[in-house]
Amino acid sequence: MTDAKLFQPFQLGALTLKNRVVMAPLTRNRATPGNAANALIAEQYRQRAGAGLLITEASPISQQGQGYINTPWIATDEQVAGWRLVTDAVHQAGGAIFVQLWHVGRVSHVSLQPDGGAPVAPSTLRANTKTFLGSGFVDVSEPRALATEELQGVVNDYVKAAKNATRAGFDGVEIHAANGYLLDQFQRDSSNKRTDAYGGSIENRARLTLEVIDAMLAALPPEKIGIRFSPVSPANDVADSNPQALFGYLVEQVGKRKLAYVHIVEGATGGPRDYAPFDYAALRKSFGGAYIANNGYDRDMALNAVETGAADLVAFGRPFISNPDLVDRLRTGAALAELDKSTLYGGDAHGYTDYPRLGQ
Ligand code: 8OZ
């Protein structure tokens, strides 16, 4: 199976990916006190540069956009320098890497917010979800609704982060519009009860996401921008009354803007793929560009998805944590190492950069 399409190069804009296996974004909470990436984080990505494309863990674009402790941001010069360690290491190892740009919205805690204020959201609805504060997971705080006049500031933070991504040496950015964070809170009607131009109709609920893209297109070419959606995932307590129509519209609009890819979490994030009915083939068709499939794929599913054309690329998350040489293992059909869940969030090199390669 070494000549399977999954292991063949793929042209993503100007980038030639060496195979069609993507490392999915994975939050690991190993940033240093200034919320910057560091040498340990760089080593973790370097070890996994065998992927055709690496997508970093979600990176907050601002303090307001932060919801978990010790996540590496992309807002300050110090943080750009931290990420530069990562991109240099990955490029030296022959890899390609996009950074995932993140605003958590209401999935945050007052202790992480500017001046201890309330996290921001489309509406004053508290999510039934938890955030990680270092000593463990705690309930998120009650949010306040963003005023219409504040939204331009959020858009500006995304654009600044995209410019910082270029300065840090990234090959591109992925807009995190999935898993119940800010953009997804605006998109879905369980969390968005606004009565201004950003609430109500599908077009209105998609508006902030599309404004972020359009503003970013002044800083980056479309082939350097991807976006992630999770159309039916209940992650972080969001839901929609008509996900097929909502995400069909969003993906069609993304296609019109010729972005590099859409990255789709199929089913419940980290959970059942058949969580709710959804036609992913129809979604793929309404886009036209590269489709990255994600969530619970194993070797056979990935080989099949790329062979049949259901997906262009397949993103693996948890398997990449315990298998730095995942692409080699998939190529040869070798067994995969088990993940140690106790070292997922926070900590040091243990359970992070000490998973061995085959024969090591
Ligand atoms: C797990 C823990 C913390 C954050 C996501 C950024 O779900 C995350 C995340 C996942 O997209």
Image: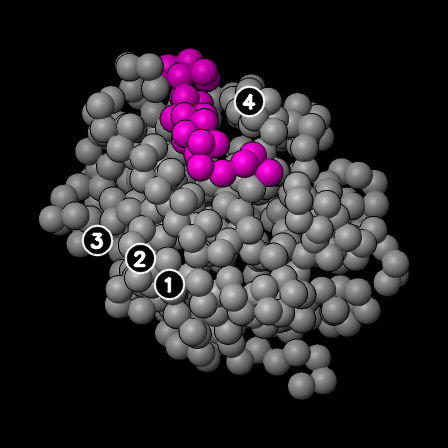
Which quadrant holds residue 156? Answer: top left
Q: Amino acid at mark 1?
A: Ala
For the residues labelled 3 and 4, the Cα–Cα distance comes to 34 Å
Callout 4 secondary element: helix
Task: State the residue in front, 45 or 250.
Answer: 45
Q: Residue at x 29, y 19 (%)?
A: 194
Q: Residue furthest bottom?
A: 360
N-term-proximal mark, 1 vs 4: 1
For the residues labelled 1 and 4, the Cα–Cα distance comes to 34 Å
Of badges 3 and 2, nearer the viewer stands: 2
Residue 220 magenta: yes
Instruction: Give the number of the disc on residue 112.
Output: 3
Residue 204 left/right relative to 68: right
User: Is disc 1 surrounded by few (<14), some (14 to 19) or many (20+) residues within 10 Å?
Assistant: some
Instruction: Give the number of the disc on residue 107.
Output: none
For the residues labelled 2 and 1, the Cα–Cα distance comes to 6 Å
Q: Amino acid at mark 4?
A: Gln
User: Is disc 2 surrounded by few (<14), some (14 to 19) or many (20+) residues within 10 Å?
Assistant: few
